[in-house]
Each structure stands twice: as C-alpha cells, then as structure tokens.
Amino acid sequence: MPQAEQVYLVGGPVRDGLLGIEAHDKDWVVIGATPEQMLSEGYLQVGRDFPVFLHPKTKEEYALARTERKQGHGYQGFVCFTSPDVTLEEDLQRRDFTINAMALSQNGLLVDPYQGQQDLNNRILRHVSNAFSEDPLRVLRGARFLARFYHLGFKVADETLALMTQLAVTGELKYLSAERVWRETERALTEANPAQYFITLQQTQALDALMPELTTGSQLSHKTLDLINISFPEQYQSLCRWGLLLKHLDEAQINQLCDRLKAPIQYKQFALLVQANFKTLVAPQLQDADSCLQLIEKSGVFKQGGLFDVLLSLLQEQPLISNQATRLKQAWLEISEQLKTITAQKFQAQGLKGIEIGQAIKATRLTLVQQWLVDINQ
C-alpha cells in the first residue's frame, strides 16, 4: 500500500461528501508512485490509456497522478503523462469543474487549490482552467451536472457557459463519438432535473449540433420539459423520460435521432410507441376500439419482453389525469388480461383454419375492447 500521505480521495466522492450526499464509489489518486510499485503491492492494472489500478481487496480504483496535453480533436485527442514527479495540484488542474477538483487526504485534510469548496457553497459550476475548452465532452458533462444539482440551487458560471458555447460553435462536438453522447444523455435522463440538461445544451448551441430534431418548432416546450422532470419507477426512468421528450417528433425524426446517437433499440421502440399512442393511452374514451387495440398490440402485451408496463407507468404522474391515473391504469391492465384469454385453440375447436383464425381473434378482441370502452365511459 502506498504511504497514506500520498493517497487521496478525489473528485465526486469529495464533492458529494461536502454536500452531505452519500457517495457509492470511491476514486483515489496516488502521488509519487510508479506502475511497477503498484503491481508489486498486488494492485491490478485496468487502465489501457493511463495507469489505473484496482485495490487487491476493496477493488476500488487507484489512479497514478497524471497531466494531459491536447493533441488532436475530440474526447480522445489527449496525451497523458504520468510520473512520480506529478503533484496533486497538477493532477487536480486537469479536471473539469472546481467542485470536482478537490482531494481529501486519508487523515481528513481537504486539498482545494482551485476554490472548489467556495464554488460548492455558492452553488456554482465553474471550470478549473481554460484547458476546459480542449475537451468537447465537458459541454455534456456540464449540462449533466446541472441536471443533477439544479434542485440544490446550482447554476453554471457565465464564463464557463461561454466556453461551452465556444466549443459548440467551433465544431469540436462533431468529434465526439455517438456512444459518448448517448452515454451522457442517458445518464442525464436519470438525474433529478433532466430538463436542465437539454436547456443547457440549447443555451450553448450544442443541441443544434447533436440533436437538431429537438430544436425545431416547440419541441422543447415548457410542457415537455415539465413532463421529463417527472419521476418514474427507477428501472423505467430514462426510458420513460426519453419517450416523453420525443413524443412530439414525427416517426422519421425519431428514427433519425435514435440512429445517429446509436441509442439502444428499446429506446427507439419506446419513443415510437409513445409518439403513436400517447393520446390513446391518456384518454382511451376519446378513441375508437381500433386505436386502443393497436396500443395493446404494439406495446407487446401478447409477447415476451413487451413495453406495456413501461407505457402504463407514464400514467402515474400526468398532470391532466392525475386524479384518475390509478383507475385508468387498472382499466388498461384489466382489458389486456382479458384479451390474453382469446387464443387460437378456441377457434381451432370450432373448425376454423389459417387466416380465418386470425380474423376471428381480431374480431373477438375488437368486440371486447368496444365493450370495455362503453364500461369505462359510464
């Protein structure tokens, strides 16, 4: 184990500790050590581009102190330099925001060379140095951190917002991989205030470069932004919010955006499902039986791994129907269970074959849905 005074807790865990938030992961930086020393003490090297090691017992990450130099475009256009001579202050200087550039020694001493604690107390997201503008991913990270901490009163410093805008308008964002953009976006969708992610990207002109479909017309209306700030079941959180964000786009725009970002297929499928069926979902009594049956079929009620449960979770906090959401959700569940009982075997027993069976199933299901609509309108 490296000497205690050479090992520091860094970044997010220090920030969250000062905010009174429980940190789930711990990141450590080691000063004055070499890769050979770390390996000799049983650490497992996992970093390909720079020396990061796993502790032999805790499996927490320990990184050797390093500096970075810009060489090329994009997030990966950096050359890392590590040496026992790199100081803690030099390592912290390469970080994005002052609130992430603090360290805590193992005896509890806070090291804060860039006034991160002051910015934390003042609820400011501020860049550490002008090297911030060398990494286009920091535009997305800044927007995501604001989405996380906005409810605590945080805002982005004006000079930092200017650097983020500069990165967007100079074209650096085009060097970000689709996977990187999606990863930050998906994480932002799980934050406390995801609307701020998209608002900040719009303010800095990054949305025009990365998701132009969301900048046309009133796609980011106050109503839409309020909807995506709603909390949903944790396992559906990002999926629900993505579907609501895209529900005003047309089918071609949804396909185009999801394909460009290389979003997982489930996200595209759900966005298309919400776009086509949202009005039916929240007000089935205003729709015909065909539309209601289409919602049930398209959401995969009759298949394994469908999206029906995810779709129903959108009902729980819709402002327009909040007083009847539980009843409406139960009604959808009841009709879906009834429809599942209509199977081919019944019609085979009646002597029907092939296409006749499919037609009979469809007609019986429609009749059932028509009666259901009568019942829920009473």
Image (cartoon, rainbow, N blue to C red):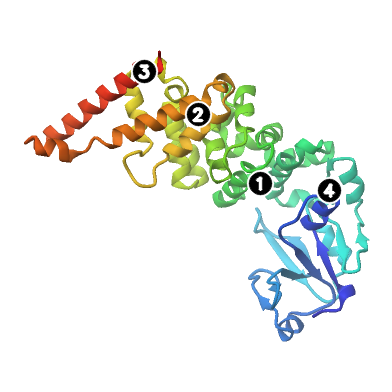
Location of residue 1 in the rendering, given as x and y in whole percent from the top left corner: 79, 80
Is 331 displayed left or right of 59 in the figure? Answer: left
Asked whether residue 367 is in view, the answer is: yes
Residue 258 position, x and y percent, is 48, 41
* Residue occupied by mark 3: 375
The residue pinned by badge 2 equals 247
Helix, strand or loop at disc 3? helix
The picture places residue 221, in percent across and down from the top left corner, at 62, 23
Give me the residue at 82% from left, 35% from top. 153
The C terminus lies in quadrant: top left
- Ranked by sequence position, the earlier of labels 4 and 2 is 4
| Left or right of 199 in this view: 100 | right
Rounded to the nearest whole Å, what is the CA distance between mark 4 and mark 2? 36 Å
Report the amino acid beneath label 1: Glu
Q: Could you say where residue 49 lies in the image, as x and y percent from the top left?
A: 66, 68
User: Could you tell which of marks 2 and 1 lies nearer the N-terminus?
Assistant: 1
Q: CA distance from mark 3 to mark 4?
A: 52 Å
Q: Which residue is mark 4?
A: 19
Question: What residue is disc 1 on?
Answer: 172
